[in-house]
Image: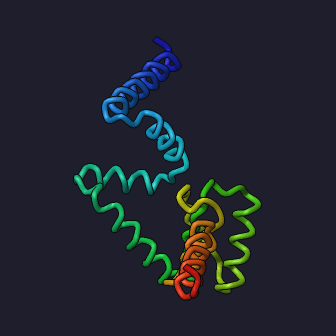
Amino acid sequence: MTSRRIEQKKVEAYARALLEAAKYEGRAARDLEQVKHVLKFSPEVMETITSMQGEDDLDLLDKVYSQYKDLLEKSDDTVSVDVTTAVPMDDELREKVREKCRKDFDAPIYLVEHVDPKILGGIVLEAKGQRRDASVRAQLVNIRKTLSSAFIGSDEQ
């Protein structure tokens, strides 16, 4: 059997195993998207995740992320900025956000992108304990507060 044929058999076996497990858990489409993102992982990230899995420590991943972010910010002047948008950012918007943050913080910027359709539109930025919420959802909440306080205080019934 040729090495190409052997490789194809491995690929098919991995794909089928993943699909069956994902179907069983009811998240086949979501797992497909996750595999696409894993392709972007560096070898050190994959190695760390594999080690954590081997030690049954994947439940610590959120804490490892936070600690890593803190250590990075302390060891480097790079500022990590969490950016939340309703849809994924394109390269043009990503560069505009990075440039705006670079001016605001006077430091190199690392963007951590999140997509949350619940914000409806706009953008939410979080860095160094500061939060700037320019989302459509936040604007609607502010409008609602303004309108309700205006009507509560009025004499009209």
Q: Where does residue 112 sit, x and y in percent of width and height?
A: 55, 65
Q: Residue at x 52, y 47 (%)?
A: 37
Residue in front for this viewpoint, 137 or 123: 137
Residue 84 at x, y percent in the picture: 57, 64
- Between residue 124 and residue 7, name the one nearer to us: 124
Task: Say whether residue 35 is left or right of residue 123.
Answer: left
Residue 101 is situated, as x and y percent measured from the top left of the image, at: 67, 78
113 relative to 132, above or below:
above
Residue at 42% in and 33% down: 28
Residue 142 vs residue 90: left or right? Answer: left
> Residue 63's quadrant in the figure?
bottom left
Assign the N terminus to one quadrant of the image.
top left
Q: Which corner quadrant holds the C terminus?
A: bottom right
Q: Looking at the image, which residue is at 61% across and 75% down?
A: 143
**Residue 17 drawn above or below residue 82:** above
Rendered residue at 75%/69% (across/down): 96
Q: Quadrant of residue 138?
A: bottom right
Give the image location of residue 69, x and y in percent.
45, 73
Asked whether the viewer can see residue 153, the reply is yes
Indicate how the structure is coloured in the image. rainbow
Picture layout, residue 89 above or below residue 101: above
